[in-house]
Image (tube, rainbow, N blue to C red):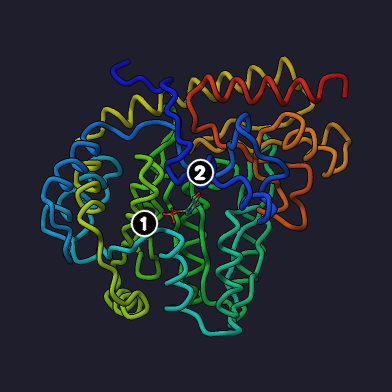
Amino acid sequence: MKYDFDEIINRRGTGSIKWDFGDDLIKMGYAEYFDEKTLPLFTADMDIAVPPPIVDAMHRTADQRIYGYTMLPPEYYEAVTGWFKRRHDWDIAPEEILFCPGTVKAVDVAINAFTEPGDGVIIQRPVYYPFTSHIEKHGRNVVNNQMLVDDDGYYKPNLEEFEDLAKIPENKLFILCNPHNPSGRIFDNDDLRELARICKENDVILIADEIHGDLIRQDQVFTPIVKTTDDVSQIVTCTAINKTFNTAGLHATNVIISNPELRKSYRKALGSAMPSPFTYNAVIAAYNECEDWVEELKTYFDGTIEWVMTFLRENMPKVKFVRPEGSYIFWMDFRGYELSAEEIRKKIYIDANVILESGTLFDPDNGEGFERICLSSPRPIIKEAFLRIAAEFKGC
Ligand SMILES: Cc1ncc(COP(=O)(O)O)c(C=O)c1O
């Protein structure tokens, strides 16, 4: 391997949410305990160095010595369109790209742009929980289209129920999360096509959060929803370098909207969104120069996930899971232990001293007994976390 993903970089003292703010995490209910031995494996950023071309771009930008107001140069658009053409065979026109400082922000803007207070926004739980908080923050209603579980244990959308919900006139927006967080599931193309059709026929705008779409298993294929249907006039897609290249702190999201009317409404709700010179140069470097790094990283995560699955089968056979098809997130079902949520939490968060994310965050009604871990740290850290957790469940 050209890159050393096993390298352990000390992030303490760098302002990292997960490594530096234990007291705040406890206050906010994310953690039960925090000390210098805590392994915080909850928030979805990586403890892995970004690709060298991005570091070089940051140095070059710093050397400019002036960080004034900036706009996106043509090279930015070329880098974005080039990446999606090469990687996903997706032709994007530069004018379809709107820069937004972050993907959560991009979803938030869509809620404001396309719905009114009192309208319903459809989500599919279990799902990335900031969707819920942002829908509620704006006085819109959360409308849950609960995911089903197929024979292999993978989540899939309940299309019948989705169609019923889409027919309700108050339900104006659907937030798709594909690859799916927290399970890593990549939706079937047929299901995506159906979701798009139902939205189109019922005048529901579909915002696709595809932030995890570039970091998938080597044996998997990710298809952006716009590539599954001919009519994309109802679709808004969020893409970002934030997860793929570990640059979440740079807040670089691109929202792709081909329908000019939707784009106009979205732009109005977005307002001024200026990228910092560091951010746009990172995007250019990431999309132009880092393909080999992404491929190696995917192979590395394949290996980590393989290790975790083998470890769980051998040491914690009561934990149920499926192999995530995308991302480094891993969703575990601890219900086989028949312990209360508090007992599970105590064992993991306090006794093993590992911070995860509890299932009820992603699904208040059905998430109890589930935990999500981010396998985005160097493998020695992941191994240590699982050894600690397994020791606490021994004999249970
Ligand atoms: C599905 C999904 N969307 C958005 C985000 C956050 O993206 P950003 O940092 O670009 O706001 C995450 C982070 O975990 C995520 O998993």
Q: Secondary structure at mark 1?
A: helix
Question: Going by the image, does 361 lie left or right of 196?
Answer: right
Label 2, residues with CA under 10 Å away: few <14, some 14-19, many ≥20: some
Give percent across and percent down for residue 358: 70, 46
The circle on residue 44 is: 2
Which residue is located at x 73 percent, y 44 percent?
Answer: 32
Residue 288 lies in what quarter of the image? top left
Instruction: Decide: is 81 above or below 214.
Output: below
Instruction: Decide: is 90 above or below 47.
Output: below
User: Which one is in front, 193 or 240?
Assistant: 240
Q: CA distance from mark 1 to mark 2?
A: 25 Å
Pick out the residue farthest to the bottom: 117
Which residue is located at x 19 percent, y 60 percent?
Answer: 93
Q: Nearer the viewer, mark 1 or mark 2?
A: 2
Give percent across and percent down for residue 86: 23, 41
Which corner quadrant holds the C terminus?
top right
> Three-letter amino acid code at disc 1?
Val
Determine whether label 1 and label 2 are within 8 Å by CB: no
Which residue is located at x 88 percent, y 35 percent?
Answer: 338
The circle on residue 226 is: 1
> Three-letter amino acid code at disc 2?
Ala
Give percent across and percent down for residue 353: 69, 32
Question: Going by the image, does 156 lie left or right of 369?
Answer: left
Instruction: Decide: is 162 above or below 120.
Output: above
User: Which one is in front, 386 or 146?
Assistant: 386
Q: Secondary structure at mark 2?
A: loop
Residue 129 lies in what quarter of the image? bottom right
Which residue is located at x 74 percent, y 34 percent?
Answer: 348
**Mark 2 vs ligand 1: CB below 8 Å:** yes
